[in-house]
Image: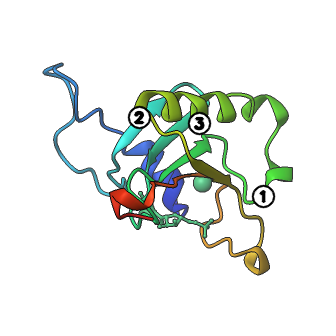
């Protein structure tokens, strides 16, 4: 499996889990991430190279490069999950961004929605 985000979904580990069965070992082909949310069709995790503190990515589990490649029913949790992240983190100022195609600065070919907090200047980030 070449897609880096499909490998992140496959490697999902709940690092906060108190369950003894929680995976603690790295399996070849899987990529670890800091998971924020997971359901049968949606996954959210922290961006590895954040533009600001709390920069997250919300993705459909269904693989597709562009928005038009994803069935509607696989997209209907995306914004509700972004809302949950905003509410749970107490983030009041943020951008939601989704790039399609190289000219639009898409680097990872699996549809993803950026959740980018915009901290106020006193906090010194962003
Ligand atoms: P794009 O430019 O395609 O819209 O954004 C891709 C995003 O994916 C970038 O913000 C980048 O930092 C993030 N990213 C790329 N590889 C990884 C990875 O292996 N793990 C995580 N957590 N984020 C990644
Ligand atoms: Zn993928």
Q: Quadrant of residue 111?
A: bottom right
Q: Position of residue 77 (x, y in %)?
A: 67, 28
Q: Residue at x 36, y 53 (%)?
A: 30
* Drawn side of residue 37 relative to residue 41, left or right: left
Task: Give the SS element for disc 2.
Answer: helix
Instruction: Quickly name the residue at label 2.
Output: 89
| Helix, strand or loop at mark 1 | loop
Could you tell me if residue 52 is visible in this image?
A: yes
| The quarter of the picture showing ligand 2 | bottom right
Please give the name of the residue rendered at 22% of the width and 35% of the height, measured from the top-left corner.
23
- Across and down, in percent, residue 72 comes to 83, 34
Tell me the CA gap for discs 1 and 2.
28 Å
Marker disc for residue 101: none
Considering only order in the chain, which callout, 3 or 2, is on the residue closer to the N terminus? 3
Q: Is residue 73 left or right of residue 124?
A: right
Q: Nearer the viewer, residue 47 or 40?
A: 47
Mark 3 or 1, nearer chain start: 1
Discs 1, 2 touching: Cβ within 8 Å: no
Structural crowding at the residue carrying mark 3, measured as other residues with C-alpha within 10 Å and reported as few (<14), some (14–19) or many (≥20): many
- Mark count: 3
The image quarter in which residue 100 lies: bottom right
For mark 1, what is the residue? 66
Q: Is residue 60 above or below residue 64?
A: above
Residue named by callout 3: 82
Picture coordinates of residue 19, whole percent (x, y): 18, 19
Q: Nearer the viewer, residue 76 or 55?
A: 55
Q: Residue at x 72, y 53 (%)?
A: 64
Q: Secondary structure at mark 3?
A: helix
| Residue 44 at x, y percent in the picture | 49, 40
User: Label 1: few (<14), some or many (≥20) within 10 Å?
Assistant: some
Lower position in the chain sequence, tag 1 or tag 2: 1
């Amino acid at each position: 499996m070449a897609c880096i985000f499909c490998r992140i979904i496959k490697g999902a580990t709940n690092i906060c889990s108190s369950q003894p069965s929680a995976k603690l070992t790295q399996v070849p082909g899987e990529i670890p991430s800091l998971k924020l949310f997971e359901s049968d069709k949606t996954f959210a995790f922290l961006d590895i190279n954040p533009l600001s503190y709390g920069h997250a990515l919300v993705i459909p589990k269904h693989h597709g490069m562009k928005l038009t490649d994803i069935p509607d029913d696989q997209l209907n949790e995306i914004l509700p999950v972004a809302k949950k992240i905003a509410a749970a983190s107490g983030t009041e100022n943020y951008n939601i961004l989704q790039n399609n195609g190289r000219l639009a600065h898409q680097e990872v070919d699996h549809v993803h929605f950026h959740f980018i907090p915009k901290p106020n200047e006193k906090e010194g980030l962003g």
